[in-house]
Image (cartoon, rainbow, N blue to C red):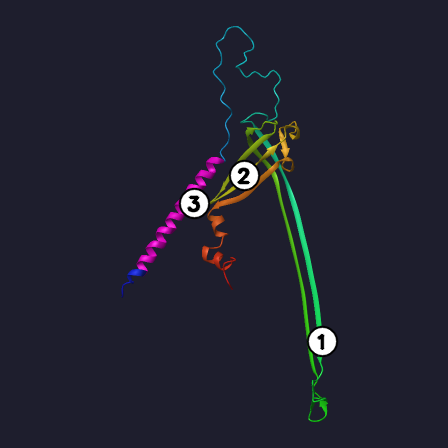
Amino acid sequence: MSKLPVYTRLVSAVLLVATLAGCAGMQERQKKEDAEWAATAPVTQPTPPPADGSIYHDMQNLELFNDPRAHRVGDILTINLVEAMQASKTSETTTSKTDKNTLNAPEVLGHTLSVKGGNTADSNLNSANSFDGAGSSTQSNQLTGEFTVTVSQRLSNGNLLVRGEKWLTINQGQELIRLSGIVRPEDIEQDNSVDSTRVADARITYTGRGVLNSANQQGWLARFFNSKWMPY
């Protein structure tokens, strides 16, 4: 058995190192992204003042009439997912063009040029072009359910910046849903819930990780042949 050439082994080693580096970089990005989406903890309250018999202290958080709706950093809020969108587009184009030109036979010494003494040497130029194209596209999606997030920031105008994620592990796969956006306190219902259609700048992600998700994805070589970089 002949040994592999040196350059073949070198190329194989470079590809292996690049693959391992890419996997490690992907894992680091996922860890960083997961840390950014972690639940927001409530703001740490200052040390309570010593007991001096007073009922109220300005440094102590005391709510005589507690509102069950989310309004502070770290509070939880339930999002009712009621996303349903449908879009369709149809286009049709038809063009037609016909050209017809006649060139009279030239005159030589006052006589019209003829062919075989009879027919004149007139020339006709005819062209016809036509195009007929049609296309249609239809897309629809629907996402329903309930999803609970936390308040990560209270903006200067009183609106709440909410963010949260939900993991569901089934067998060898993980389902992940993430949501972030801005909610007005006036849109929060008495049961501490708000519809997703009331969330401004909403970003909803529904994806998966694991064996099942990888099985539903094309390999990198197949993606290359199906990408815009493939010239054929």
Determine which quarter of the picture holds residue 191.
Answer: top right
Residue at 44% of width from left, 39% of height from top? 31
Q: Which mark is residue 26?
A: 3
Q: Is residue 2 shown in magenta? A: no
Residue pointed to by mark 2 = 178
Residue occupying the far front of the picture? 109
- N-terminal of the pair, mark 1 or mark 2, is 1
Residue at 31% of width from left, 60% of height from top? 7
Above or below residue 167? Residue 127 is below
The amino acid marked with disc number 1 is Lys
Residue pointed to by mark 1 = 100
Camera-near label (2 vs 3) is 3
> Considering the image in quadrants, where does the N terminus appear?
bottom left
Q: How many marks?
A: 3
- Estimate the spatial distance between the alpha carbons at disc 1 and disc 3, rounded to whole Å: 64 Å
Q: Classify mark 1: helix, strand or loop.
A: strand
Residue at 65% of width from left, 35% of height from top? 198
Q: Observer-nearest residue: 188 or 57?
A: 57
Residue occupying the far top of the picture? 53
Mark 1 Cα within 10 Å, few/some/many (few <14, many 20+)? few
User: Start and end of the magenta stretch?
Assistant: 8-36
Mark 2 Cα within 10 Å, few/some/many (few <14, many 20+)? some
Camera-near label (1 vs 2) is 1
Image location (x, y in percent) of residue 146? 60, 36
Q: Classify mark 2: helix, strand or loop.
A: strand
Above or below residue 179? Residue 69 is above
The amino acid marked with disc number 3 is Met
- Estimate the spatial distance between the alpha carbons at disc 2 and disc 3, rounded to whole Å: 19 Å
Q: Classify mark 3: helix, strand or loop.
A: helix
